[in-house]
Image (spheres, coloured by chain):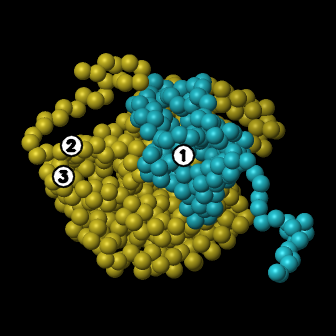
Amino acid sequence: MAQHQVNYTQDGGLPVALTSVDKVINWGRSNSLWAMTYGLACCGIEMMASGASRYDFDRFGTIFRASPRQSDLMIVAGTLTKKHAEFIKRLYDQMAEPRWVISMGSCANTGGMFNTYATVQGVDRIIPVDLYLPGCAPRPETLQYAVMMLQKKIRAEKAGRAQRPKRLV
Amino acid sequence: MQQPNRLRPFFENISFDRKDNEMVINFGPQHPSAHGQLRLILHLQQEQITKAHPDIGYLHRGMEKMAENMIYNEFMPTTDRMDYIASSSNNYGFALAVEKLIGLQVPRRAKVIRMMLLEINRLMSHLFWLATTALDIGAMTVFLYAFREREYLMDIIEDYCGARLTHSSIRIGGVPLDIPDNFIHDLKAFLDKFPQDLKDYEDLLDSNRIWKMRMENVGVISKEMAQSWGCSGVMLRASGVNWDIRKEEPYELYDEIEFDVPVSEKGDNYARYKLYMAEMRETSKILYQTIKMYEGTVKENQTELMAHAPQYISAPKIDIMTQNYSLMQHFVLVTQGMRPPVGEVYIATESPKGELGFYINSQGGPYPYRLKVRAPSFWHTGILTDLLPGSMIPDVVSIIGTTNIVFGEVDR
């Protein structure tokens, strides 16, 4: 009988990787963040630019989807008005868990320069937000950095259980 | 009957008269091809639209009201967020209106720089239009190509004013800065390359069967219809009306520049697409001429960038730092704002989308008594009521695409 010649303590070791389920699931989740096309105003143009040729979001596994049911990430890009507010809530509810929200730009963060009768002063009054990114409008690099931060956050979460309820500000 | 509360104001006061066999569908306000927050209520007989009702206001931010509580210079960054695809053209429209109100003479060099910025913005806007419309119809390649060229232009603008999207690059009375050293070089390099890029897009689209089927004889606007709905810009010119405000009432130095206004008689989507492409070629022609004009001003050593009107415009920075009186005036102008004379003014400019007009009513105070924006997209949204009935559902997307509406401008 032929002797087994592989020395498992050398040559790269065992062909087995040991990890926890959390890490594997979170690795998958964080590297295929499908974002919803939620361009509301000016920031939506920068969001499109980050999806387009120069900034190429596909490298992060971020593909823009038109339906909330297919997406994990909602990038609220632009001013949320009171007239639109009920739709953002409805769309957020239609997203399957686990789901994350990035509030892009000053208008979505705090209402920004539009402190008027028509504007919601921050999207976090309607839906819970995971990440705020400043700027008016933030550059595509900023959005890419935000997605990287979100990936970090996802990797630090527990994957097995349902997400803890997020708090509205 | 719905009860109004904080999240549900009274806005759904649209009556549906239901008939048998008629389906009412809702399009938007969050729809990837609605170009922002357009909501359409469509009545259908099978696949044909019988009635269309555009519902706007989902991006109404109250800009005109904001203007009433802002000094004139303070309002300038807000105009950026109106037509956010071509910010400088809004800046310019507002600046021109205030200049007419107080009767300022802008130095020649500032005028040339303004024209450069305006035309670069026109190219950016048209490229963006091409990208999104092609994407809506399914031509992903054109989207990626057009955005590539748009990024070059954004780099050039960024060299000038530091911002990619919201430029605030024009001031009342002139421009804040001279153009940087490499600006002309970069712009020339782009313009030399650009005809080849345009040819690439046209090779991809012009005789593409899908593109032609989606565009030809779809969304036909007759001449009378275009005029009665207040269309302007490409929407009007595609329907056979030769009307360009740069030609009719030349502002800045457009009367010194030679360019053609492309006009088409057909009035369908395809005609509008061809006009946008032709306009991009004309714009490159204008840009070449502005570069020459700029070099002329350098030769003649005209270095003034802001109008001289101590009552309204701050002195140059060097004077503010060295002369006491200029510093005092600057302080008053920044804290209290300029006070234009009593009067009202309406100025129309040819923005990339059409006629962009600013109406300002001044009562002599530091704030405008009323500011009204006549945005072209608003009128082009209105025409959808008449344009959509009779067409099929898939045509809605291509028609909305070629109307080139931007919701920051429609709702303000």
Q: Chain of mark 2?
A: B
**Residue identifier under label 3:** B49
Return the residue found at the far right: A10
Which residue: 34% across, 19% down? B4
Task: Find numbered disc 1 in the image and state the secondary structure of the residue it sits on.
Answer: loop
Above or below for B372 versus B109: above
* Labelled disc at residue A72: 1
Residue under the point 28% across and 55% down: B396
What is the x, y in percent for residue B52?
21, 46
Which of pointers 2 and 3 indicates the residue nearer the eye?
A: 2
Chain B: colour as depicted: yellow
Q: Is residue B155 visible?
A: yes
Could one spot residue B85 in this view of the protein? Answer: no
Q: Are marks 2 and 3 in contact (CB under 8 Å)?
A: no
Spot occupied by residue B262 in the image (x, y as percentages of width and height)? 34, 70
Quarter of the picture containing the C terminus of chain B is top left
Q: Residue furthest left?
A: B20
Of the residues shown, which amino acid type is indicated by label 3? Answer: Ile
Q: Residue at x 39, y 60 (%)?
A: B136
Counting residues from the start of the chain, the first of labels 2 and 3 encountered is 2
Which three-letter amino acid code belongs to the residue tagged 1? Asp
Residue B73, numbered circle: none
Q: SS at mark 2?
A: strand
Quadrant position of residue B403: bottom left
Label the cyan chain with its letter: A
Q: Quadrant of the N terminus of chain B?
A: top left
Where does residue B409 sit, x and y in percent of width and height?
Answer: 42, 44
- Image point 35% across, 67% down: which residue? B273
Give the camera-side residue of B106 and B141. Answer: B141
Secondary structure, mark 3, is strand
* Residue for badge 2: B24
